[in-house]
Image (tube, rainbow, N blue to C red):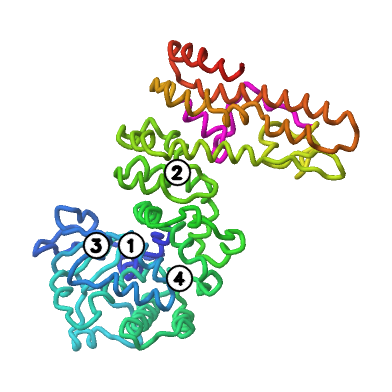
Amino acid sequence: MKKTLAAILLLLLTSTLFAKEGTGTRGGGYVIDVNGTPRLFDIVSNETCRWVTGEDLLTLENLKLQEALDKISEVDWYFAHELSLELRYLKYCFTGDLFKLPLEPDPIIKEDIRNFFKLNQAGIRYLSKVFISKKIFQELNYPWDRELFIIHEVMHSYLSYNWDVPTRRIRLESMVATIGKVLRGELKSRKDFHFQMESNDIKFPRTVDNFDQYKEQIIYLTETRSVKEKMLLNSNSPESLINLPIENLKKYLAPWDQEIVSNYVFNSLIEDLSFVMINGSISDFKNIVTKEYKKINPVFLAFSNYNWLSSSKFQFVLESNQLQNNILSSIKSIENQKLTFTDFRIKANAEIQTLGFEIPKNELVNFTSLKPKATKYRLENSSLLYPWAGMAKVVHYLAKEKRWDLLTSLFIENPYFRKVYHLEHLNEQIMTSSTYFSGEKVLALNVLNELKSGMHIQFWNEIVQGIDEQTLNELQSKWKELNI
């Protein structure tokens, strides 16, 4: 995990397993008692431990860890969320008696005091592993003691590796005691909780006030894939899960989260949705495809993943109204592309600029300066936001599957598709426009014809990728009808 640095997580072993520099000694081997049998600590494995994951701990009936995290979340949801991530990252070994870690010189607790109070070694945190005495753990029956025990071990990730052992223990125990007050309902103030974090120098930001309104988004961006999948399925609008001002907020996040959030781009959401489509059940697939989106076309996304989707999932798309509705919405989005007029000069907005290279590059360029994109390349398809790329995926699939009936009705004989395919919507705008000089319409129409030719070639290049020769010949003969 991002926080689980080796130097940080040597725990109490940092000062006790190794001698100080200059002594010529570099420590020795230790054994751990596993179910009554001594084993070398270095090689404790699944054979000698009953290993459980953090996910397992969250679901144990006699352990209310999720409830504890929920209570912490009421005070600081960001800290509770990160605590949950770290808890789930660690591995836990339930075993026999643990060896007692030697105490460093301590102004408070001496070895004889430890013996007097019968202090026992109940757990050891070592790197990303937690070794737990099963017997002692089961004897913890006081409310919240078991939960706080696990939280104690997880909290080592938020301590400075520069501290000596007594300082680590004192600050850790103080913070765990504070969390105990939260669980018992004795501390409910975020301000007081952050004061205790500050006093104990816990290595975690106390800045959640700056992004409270983006709780769902921050959790989604920093969660594991399995949790992201659940959030996508439960969200009415998946795109809203990444709708936040990342550049303004990332400075308030923990350093490891800053990197995660900064690297998450819109295409990452496309990948997350694709993962659910491919690996989820047919019910999950229907859930994702029928959700509300503003930028993403879920049906086009399904067609872009057709090599990995089951036939039952595609059958749903083909037999429902989803395909027809999405083709129609894409055609409408193209029809809604508007030329911009400033000082009676024809300009091209960002949507229309996708048809060609603009010279010079600025927000609004003269329409007559657009030149067709290099026709040897395929359509811009990185995010499937461009409707032409999405429709090309559909044509490609229908041709490969020889669904000529659907291909003909949706595209070749569809008068609405024919209109946008020939860019007639832009032609009409040019013809009805008032321009600065009489020759501009002629120039604009010539440019439009060039752009149309270039777009047709790119569209075709996208369609025919990987289609066999016989299918290609059939498609070509049918596609010619569009140009009549």
Which residue is nearer to you in this view: 311 or 186?
A: 311
Where residue 92 is drawn, which disc sits there? 3
Label 3, label 1: how far apart the Cα atoms are = 31 Å
- Eye-nearest disc, 4 or 2: 2
Label 2, label 1: how far apart the Cα atoms are = 51 Å
Q: Which residue is mark 1?
A: 25
Q: Amino acid at mark 1?
A: Thr
Q: Quadrant of the N terminus?
A: bottom left
Label 3, label 2: how far apart the Cα atoms are = 32 Å
Span colored in magenta: 369-396
Q: Secondary structure at mark 3?
A: strand
Q: Amino acid at mark 2?
A: Glu
Where residue 162 is drawn, which disc sits there? 4
Which residue is nearer to you in this view: 267 or 28?
A: 267
Which residue is painted at 62% across and 23% down in the image?
A: 456
**Disc 2 and disc 1 in contact, CB within 8 angstroms:** no
From what the image shows, is residue 421 above or below residue 260? above
